[in-house]
Image: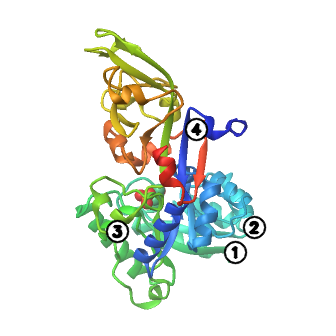
Amino acid sequence: MTGDVPAAGSSVYAEIDLAAIRSNTRLLMERAAPAQLMAVVKADAYSHGATQIAPVLEQEGVAAFAVARPTEGVELREAGITTRILVLGAPLPGDLPVCAHHDLDVTVSSLEVAERVRDYARVQPLRVHLKVDTGMSRLGVSPEDVSDVYRTLQKERRVTVGGVWTHFATADAPGHPLTATQRERFDALRRELDLPLSFHTDNTGALLTGDGTLPSPEGPASQTYPSYVRTGIAVYGLAPTSELSSGEVASKLRPALALRARVTHLHTIDAGTSVSYGATWTADRPTRIATLGAGYADGYPRLGSGSARVRIGDELRPVVGTICMDMCMVDLGPPDSPLARRVEVGNAATLFGPDGPTIYDVARWARTIPYEICCGLSRRVPRIYTDGEDSEDEANR
Ligand SMILES: *Cc1c(COP(=O)(O)O)cnc(C)c1O
C-alpha cells in the first residue's frame, strides 16, 4: 500500500538509521562477550523492519536471532537469513512442521510440547531449546520437571537440544530480589542437569544491570558457557526504561528510530476557540495552530493528549487537544511570533527521535514503556532507511 507513495512526500514517516543499529550491535557484542548476541527481531524488529535489520545484524556477526512466532522466522528465511533462529513463543501443534521445514529452533515449554516434538521428529528432525519457568509465570517447564522433559526429548535421536533458557520478570529494575531468585533457581538447575548445553538468561535489562549473570559453571556446562544474551531493545538503541538509559553502556546506545510528521494545514484561531474532539483544550489568546498528518492510527498514542510535545522549527511545542486517528494539532504560539511566521505547510515536525522528544518522553506522556511506542508504529507509516552520514541533515530538515 505504502509502496506506491514516495515516502518523503508522506504526511508521516519513520526514519531508521542503520549506522546506529550497527554501532549498537558492536557495543552490545563487546559488552556481552564472551557470551554471544542473540538479536531479538520479533514484532518486525520492534517496528524497524525485520527484513531490513536482520541482514545488517547478520553482517555484524550476531550468533543467532530470536522471534516470537514461527511466521516471523519464515519471513526471515524467505529474506535469505541463514543464521540460527529461535522461536520464543510456545508452539501450537501446527507450528512444528513449519519450524522443521524452515530450520527454526522450537521452544519446548511443557511436557506435552516435548512429547509432540519427540513424535514429530520421527517425520522430520527438530532442533529445540528448553524453556524453564523460574519466576516469570508465563511460559515454561517448572524446574522440578526439567529432567523428565529432557529425558522425553532424548528418546528421539532426531531431536537436538540446543539450549536451556529462562526469562527474567524484573531485569529492568536494578537489584530486584526476584531477579536474584530466578538466577539462583536457574543456576541450581544447571548444576543438577550438568550437561553441555547453552544455558541462557539475559535480556537487555539483565545485560545492562549485570543482575542476571550466572556464575561460571564447572563440568560439562562449562563447554558451552557463556552462551547467549537475548537483546532486543538495545539493538535499536534504547534501554528498557529511561532510568537505565543513563548507565555506562546504555548512554552509548544510539536510538535508530525517528518519527516525523508534516504540517498539512495551518490556521489562526481566536481566544476562546477549542481544538479537536471533546473540546478538551481552548486557546486563551489568538493562536497559530499547525495540523500534523500523524495520529494514533500511525502509532502516536492518544494517551499522550494533553502532555505531548513535538519539535517543530527547532522549538519544542505542545500538542493541543485530543490526538486524532490521522492528525494532531500543535500550538505554535501567537500568530506574530517568529515560529508561527516561519512554519509552512510541508515542514516536518519530530514526534520522537534522537534529537528529542525521545521515545522515553512519548512513553511517559502515554503512561507506557518505550517498547510499546516502538511496536505501536503502524504499517501505514513509510520507513526511510538512512545509513548514518545524512541522518543529521534529515533531523534538521
Ligand atoms: C522480547 C524478549 C527478549 C528481548 O527483550 P529486550 O528487553 O528487548 O532485550 C528476550 N527474551 C525473551 C524471552 C523475550 O520475549
- Mark 3 packing: few (<14 Cα in 10 Å), some, or many (20+)? some
Badge nearest the viewer, 4 or 2: 4
**Amino acid type indicated by mark 4:** Val
**Amino acid type indicated by mark 3:** Val
The residue lying toward the viewer, choosing from 191 and 98, is: 98
Query: What residue do we see at 54% from left, 31% from top?
Result: 346
Mark 2 vs 1, N-terminal side: 2
- The answer to whether marks 3 and 2 mark residues whose Cβ atoms lie closer than 8 Å is no
Tag shown at residue 124: 2
- Mark 1 packing: few (<14 Cα in 10 Å), some, or many (20+)? some
**Amino acid type indicated by mark 2:** Gln
- The answer to whether marks 2 and 1 mark residues whose Cβ atoms lie closer than 8 Å is yes
Badge nearest the viewer, 3 or 2: 3
Tag shown at residue 158: 1
Tag shown at residue 319: none
Distance Cα–Cα, label 3 vs label 1: 41 Å
The residue lying toward the viewer, choosing from 302 and 210, is: 302
Query: What residue do we see at 74% from left, 58% from top?
Result: 78
Mark 1 vs 4, N-terminal side: 1
Q: Mark 3 = which residue?
A: 249
- Mark 2 packing: few (<14 Cα in 10 Å), some, or many (20+)? some
Q: Position of residue 283 (x, y in %)?
A: 29, 15
Distance Cα–Cα, label 3 vs label 4: 31 Å
Residue pushed farthest bottom?
219
- The answer to whether marks 1 and 4 mark residues whose Cβ atoms lie closer than 8 Å is no
Q: Which image quadrant: the N terminus?
A: top right
Query: What residue do we see at 30% from left, 31% from top?
Result: 307
Q: Position of residue 17 (x, y in %)?
A: 53, 56
Distance Cα–Cα, label 3 vs label 2: 43 Å
Kindly indicate the quadrant of the structure image that contains residue 70: bottom right
Secondary structure beneath dot 2 equals loop
